[in-house]
Amino acid sequence: MWMIEKKVISAVRALAEHNSFSVAADVVGTSPASFSRYINQAETYAGISLFERGGNGTFPTPAGRRFLQMLDALHLAGSQFEAGVDKLRQAGPANLNIGYGPLASRTILAPLLSEILQEHSKFRALVQVRATKDPLDDLRLGKLDVVVCDLTHTPDLRDLEICLLQKEPIAFWARPSHPLHKKGSLSVKEIFRGSLGSAHLHRHWRTAVANILGNDKAAWDIVDQLPQVESDDFAFLTELACHSDLILAGMKADIAQHRSLGLLKQLHTKETLTWNICAARRAGSSFPMLDIFWKRLDARHGISPAPPVPQQTAEAV
């Protein structure tokens, strides 16, 4: 099956209008021989004679008149198709598919989406929470449009556009009755020797914690047991920390409500750890809602000017 060419369509329309091969050929701007070939192609395509040749001129047959009607329908459908494609280009996908790590929800994502929703009532988002590197796999496959998480463990960023965000300090929280509150200012070593609840600790963080603990066999024995409770559902971990001696690592925005109610209290540490937050999208990926999200994310939280990102790995904090 082949699609009829535009020059063949033009020839059929011109002959139907002027009823003369020579005149129609001049109107189309081609030689009589080429014009006759176009009409023969149209009749071969239709499988039936489209014009009746006579002494008084050349006129469409009943099949030819029907063929012209179908050409009009084809032109209308083509125009509607092009208009639809233009609309898709302007609107982008129906959903903005977002993947993010648990600690980015209240600090970054919720305020940003709240602002966009106020200005774009038809904006739609599908949000997936994951702490592992799976979001980047889904990003490369096109299942996600943008990812906001800790990307320091990613071995290869060359096919991604990266937006480095401002580093956020990590605080440690426990219920007010937790024994560690009695010690006052703590070292991070003491924190990690306790019962910790967190999202997935990838290799970067496990190495960082092991270094803090001395990077010996005893340190790695502790690291291998962390966390005691692992979950990407940060709300679940928060509630669990309110009713057990589990220590929770998070940012103040994530704990604000529980802190105000006196359910969780910050454990003060001598050292400060920061979370290296990045955003990623596929290189060259662009549609209106993704661009709006990306630009506002960079304006609100981006490091400007952004430091260079190595091709093979993002720099660990």
Image (tube, rainbow, N blue to C red):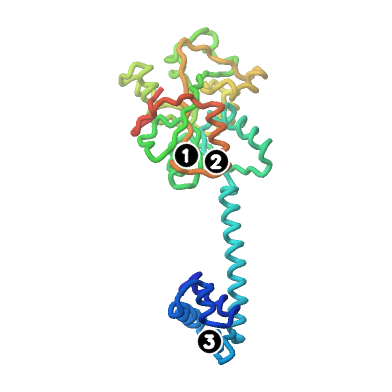
Q: Helix, strand, or loop for circle 2?
A: helix
Say above or below: 308 vs 58: above
Q: Tell me whether circle 2 and circle 3 mark residues in contact (CB < 8 Å).
A: no
Q: CA distance from mark 2 to mark 3?
A: 53 Å
Q: Nearer the viewer, residue 75 or 211?
A: 75
Q: CA distance from mark 1 to mark 2?
A: 9 Å
Q: Helix, strand, or loop for circle 3?
A: loop
Numbered badge on residue 281: 1
Work out which residue is located at the far bottom of the displayed protein and give it.
55
Specify the amino acid type for callout 1: Arg
Instruction: Sort mark 1 into few (<14), some (14-19) or many (20+) by Cα contacts within 10 Å.
Output: many
Q: Earlier in the sequence, mark 1 or mark 3?
A: 3
Q: Which residue is mark 2?
A: 290
Q: Nearer the viewer, residue 305 or 176?
A: 305
Specify the amino acid type for callout 3: Ser
Q: Nearer the viewer, mark 2 or mark 3?
A: 3
Q: CA distance from mark 1 to mark 3?
A: 56 Å
Instruction: Sort mark 2 into few (<14), some (14-19) or many (20+) by Cα contacts within 10 Å.
Output: some
In this rendering, position of residue 198 left or right of residue 217: right
Q: Earlier in the sequence, mark 2 or mark 3?
A: 3
Q: Tell me whether circle 1 and circle 2 mark residues in contact (CB < 8 Å).
A: yes
Q: Residue 143, image x and y in percent?
A: 49, 47
Q: Nearer the viewer, residue 120 or 216?
A: 120
Q: Which residue is mark 3?
A: 49
